[in-house]
Image (cartoon, rainbow, N blue to C red):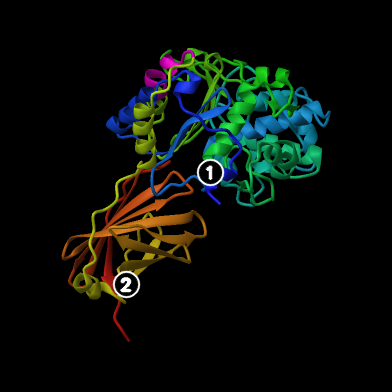
Amino acid sequence: MNALAKTSLPRTSPESQGLSSQAVLDFLDDAARKGLELHSFMLVRNGCVIAEGWWNPYQLHLRHSLYSLSKSFTATAIGMAVEENLLNLTDRVVDFFPDKRPSSLDARWQALTVEHLLTMTTGHREDTLERVLGAPDGDWIKAFFACPLELEPGTTFVYNTPATYMLSAILQRAAGEKLIDYLRPRLFEPLGIADPVWLECPQGINTGGFGLSITTEDIAKFGLLFLNKGMWNGVRLISADWINRASSKQVSNFVADPTSDWQQGYGYQMWMCRHRAYRGDGAFGQFCVVMPEQNAVVAITAGVPTMQPVLDCIWDNILPHFGETLPENPGLHSRLQDRLSRLSLPILPGEWNAGDAAKIDGQRYILEPNELGLTWVEFAADRGEIQLTLGEKGKAVTLKAGFGRYAASQTEEEGLCQACAAWEDESTLVVLARFVETPFSRTAVMRFIGDELTLEIKQNCSFGPAEHPPVKGRRARRD
């Protein structure tokens, strides 16, 4: 069966919903001109998908990690739990964890409520993520309570991912099941979101503030639920009142730049946008943008280091051009469909060279100590592919790379990898690995001189450095 036939949203032309196909072509041109690495794009208006595309090797059926876009789903679960009287926004955070909180907590901790977590106004001066993730005993709740509150809760917006984790932990305590299991019959199954995946902390609690992986259409469905004020196929999944509160400014986060879409205010784990829109978003370009006045939703996954240009492409090329139904334009629409079907990210233009491959086939190189934690790399060549196996943090990770094409590998931590390779010259091998269920791709340049290897790795986007110092290695002696 065609994968598209399994999806639930109807498809139609942009013109039938009041947007010229040219507006979408202009969006694609603008994103390409700006060098934005988009992985997928879906535009919905009046409940219909009017444009969609995946940049090869990213695909319609693949889940993509949402990073902080996960937060909007966590907040929605809290709204559902409030409506089921499992908890209240005014409930104190400390009361959910008598076994986790310190014996003595000051007045600020005693005042911290569920709503403060939702609005990122906990009273911390900075994000506590590193301290919480780094808890030596793996107890993130205790680590959160160990972070002092320097400010009065409710007074100051500070983006704080562990605040959302605490919402997940509270939901699990109140509902008696994990966040993902709570949402399955209430949100995921009604929306047709199949097989969502959500990371867990060492204590078995869904991470809440990140870690959810679903498809692009799943993101669009979530945005459409908000656009429809909590209704889905004639059934109310969550109240219009909660949707209105979650998607309205609850706290100011203005700092210095009124043109930034990150300084328009914050709701319940939702960002306010310019142009009276709002969104959930995640690091490196994961977006669910809701435009109520245009009755439209945009879902995007990406791997970009800076996110504002992606929104600017929407505001400049799509949002201003919505109108009433337009006459069909078969020629223009065909051009758009052709363009969307051929979207692709750059692939290395490599050709298989058996002679060059033979030089490294079966060779292992021992690497000098490095910040990447790589200890060795081994090569195998077979049937037009190079196979790399890397020793990393006590594990072996194997990737296959094709020449002039992608080769697939499954990795434990980052899921499916599609990789390609090329010989830059007789002693330089380049491998591009796209981890297509995440925002990340990595390019490795390997130079072989005699018994020595120099390895350089750079990444398209990263929380840390995108490029690393060269790693030196020496060929291991054969016994």
Looking at the image, residue 425 lies above or below residue 103: below
What secondary structure predominates along the stretch shown in magenta? helix
Q: In this image, 39 relative to 132: left or right?
A: left
Can the viewer see residue 367 in this picture?
yes
C-alpha distance separating marks 2 and 1: 33 Å
- In this picture, residue 45 sits left or right of residue 208: left
Q: Position of residue 183 (x, y in %)?
A: 71, 39
- Whether residue 101 is visible, yes or no, is no
Query: Does 425 appear above or below 156?
Result: below
Disc 2 designates what residue?
Answer: 383
Q: Residue at x 28, y 66 (%)?
A: 473
Q: Quadrant of the C terminus?
A: bottom left
Q: Residues within 10 Å of mark 2 (few under 14, many from 20)?
A: few
In this orientation, which residue lies closer to the viewer: 344 or 201?
344
Mark 1, secondary structure of its residue: helix
Q: Position of residue 217 (x, y in %)?
A: 55, 37
The residue lying toward the viewer, choosing from 174 and 35, is 35
| Kind of element beneath mark 2 | loop
Q: Which residue is mark 1?
A: 4
